Image (spheres, helix red, strand yellow):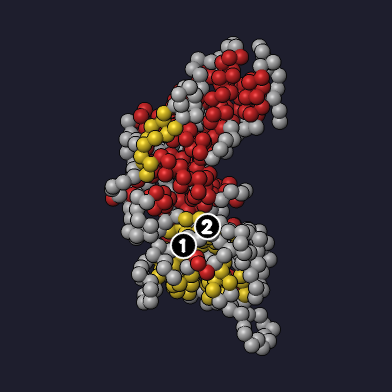
């Protein structure tokens, strides 16, 4: 991929630079085709026809102004980044301005800049939709685009922003020029409360691991999150969120060359059922994981959040295959690829567990298959809290006790000090960060201080030392 010859003034150094930068995201012939219809850019960038509903409360309408916010996306992006009135007969100056706008949206940049542009679009769309918004964009003194976003996001505004970003990802499968989801059932928005709560805890707006149980966005009041605090949280927890604007613009531009008759759209019917009671990998949890992982698995989880989980990818489910390590092994033996293990459990009473009876969810993302051995193994993995708060813990790089899978074989030999039978992740034998017993009846989650494999951080709210929790 490289820069093509330019019309008018091919010797322009800046134009060649902008063309080279843009061609890393989309082909220059496609960008030229979009530029030739620049007067229709607001329509080109508009959100495809669709209606949405909220998952909680069940079957309720989307938040106020949500559909108006989506309707304002195309005109807002066009007005903020692309020169109005450009056409194929215009000179290189307009083409250069178009490239500048595209690169401001889509070129690779330091982590904070794409997010600032996303917040800039959000603030502009909110203004056009008449929606409340506590942040605003302030250009730099030279009038360039690298200004700062200032202000504060209330919990409800964070939810609205997250839903807007998810909808932008969802729209990537809807073809241009077709009726999209019109006339079909509304699309179910994913649950994002665990992400909102994560942002508030990170910023100190909600006391760390206090008052988390039963927390709801609709009932949240008090201090919000400043734009700087929100940016810090995104970079550390869900860095993929900053790519939402770039993905959306590129998807809308690509749709210009798609035959609407032949294109396969994302049907709203794929996302109307709430699978929270069926699969632990709900659309909201899948999307949160897709935003946090920095590898090719991100696209897989994004797809699961948009069109649902492919049942062919499900290796083991305790309610369907039975509990116990032997049942688990019969389903996963021979599989060598990456695997996501999701656990839903409740805290038992007694001891130092101050949150007895509360249900929580955690997950482990292992990047290799399972092996039956009595030692830790693995090259890379992630620990994740999925409910009631989202928190991703990456490998620390100090130790490599990624995973442990040991079950009793038919050939039994005497062992003076037998190794524990079960699944484990992190820590060391006898002091595992997460340990699931052989019967899959108990999971022990220990304090991060015992683990040098994964980053510090609690997986369960109010986790003080070591707890035993029951499924």
* Local SS, label 2: strand
**Quadrant of the snapshot with the N terminus:** top right
Residue drawn at point x = 56 percent, y = 61 percent: 454
Q: Residue at x 56, y 21 (%)?
A: 98
Quadrant location of the C terminus in the rendered image: bottom left
Q: Name the residue under label 1.
A: 459
Q: Say above or below: 120 vs 41.
A: below
Per the image, label 1 sits on a secondary structure element best described as loop
Left or right, 177 with reference to 262: left
Q: Quarter of the image holding residue 153?
A: top left
Is 17 or 216 nearer to us in this picture? 17
Q: Position of residue 52 (x, y in %)?
A: 40, 41
Front-lying residue, 288 or 270? 288
Location of residue 398 (image quadrant): bottom right
Who is closer to the viewer here, 427 or 361?
A: 427
Residue at 71% from the left image edge and 28% from the top image edge: 2
């Amino acid at each position: 991929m490289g820069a093509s010859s330019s019309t008018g003034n091919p010797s322009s150094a800046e134009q060649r630079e902008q063309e080279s930068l843009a061609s890393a995201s989309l082909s220059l012939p496609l960008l030229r085709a979009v530029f030739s219809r620049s007067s229709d850019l607001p329509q080109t960038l508009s959100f495809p026809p669709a209606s949405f509903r909220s998952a909680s409360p069940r079957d309720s309408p989307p938040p106020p102004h949500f559909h108006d916010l989506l309707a304002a996306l195309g005109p807002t992006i066009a007005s903020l980044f692309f020169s109005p009135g450009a056409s194929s007969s215009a000179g290189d100056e307009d083409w250069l301005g178009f490239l500048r706008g595209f690169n401001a949206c889509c070129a690779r940049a330091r982590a904070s800049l794409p997010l600032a542009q996303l917040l800039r679009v959000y603030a502009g769309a909110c203004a056009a939709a008449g929606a409340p918004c506590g942040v605003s964009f302030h250009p730099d003194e030279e009038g360039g685009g690298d200004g700062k976003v200032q202000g504060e996001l209330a919990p409800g505004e964070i939810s609205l922003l997250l839903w807007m970003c998810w909808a932008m990802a969802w729209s990537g499968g809807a073809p241009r020029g077709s009726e999209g989801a019109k006339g079909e059932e509304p699309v179910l928005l994913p649950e994002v409360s665990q992400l909102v709560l994560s942002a508030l805890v990170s910023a100190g707006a909600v006391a760390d691991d206090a008052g988390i149980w039963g927390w709801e966005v609709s009932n949240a009041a008090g201090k919000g999150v400043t734009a700087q605090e929100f940016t810090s949280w995104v970079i550390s927890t869900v860095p993929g969120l900053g790519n939402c604007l770039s993905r959306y613009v590129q998807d809308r531009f690509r749709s210009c060359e798609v035959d609407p008759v032949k294109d396969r759209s994302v049907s709203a019917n794929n996302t109307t059922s709430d699978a929270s009671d069926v699969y632990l990998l709900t659309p909201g949890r899948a999307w949160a994981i897709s935003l946090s992982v920095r590898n090719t698995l991100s696209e897989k989880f994004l797809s699961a959040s948009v069109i649902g989980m492919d049942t062919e990818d499900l290796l083991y489910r305790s309610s369907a295959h039975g509990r116990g390590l032997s049942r688990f092994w019969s389903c996963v033996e021979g599989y060598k690829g990456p695997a996501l293990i999701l656990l839903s459990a409740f805290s038992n009473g007694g001891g130092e567990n101050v949150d007895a009876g509360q249900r929580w969810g955690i997950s482990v993302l292992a990047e290799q298959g399972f092996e039956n051995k009595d030692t830790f193994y693995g090259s890379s993995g992630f620990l994740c809290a999925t409910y009631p708060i989202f928190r991703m813990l990456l490998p620390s790089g100090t130790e490599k006790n990624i995973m442990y899978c040991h079950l009793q074989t038919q050939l039994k030999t005497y062992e003076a000090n037998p190794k524990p039978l079960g699944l484990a992740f992190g820590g060391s034998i006898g002091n595992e960060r997460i340990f699931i017993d052989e019967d899959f009846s108990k999971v022990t989650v220990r304090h991060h201080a015992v683990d040098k494999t994964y980053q510090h951080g609690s997986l369960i709210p109010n986790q003080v030392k070591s707890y035993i929790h029951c499924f």
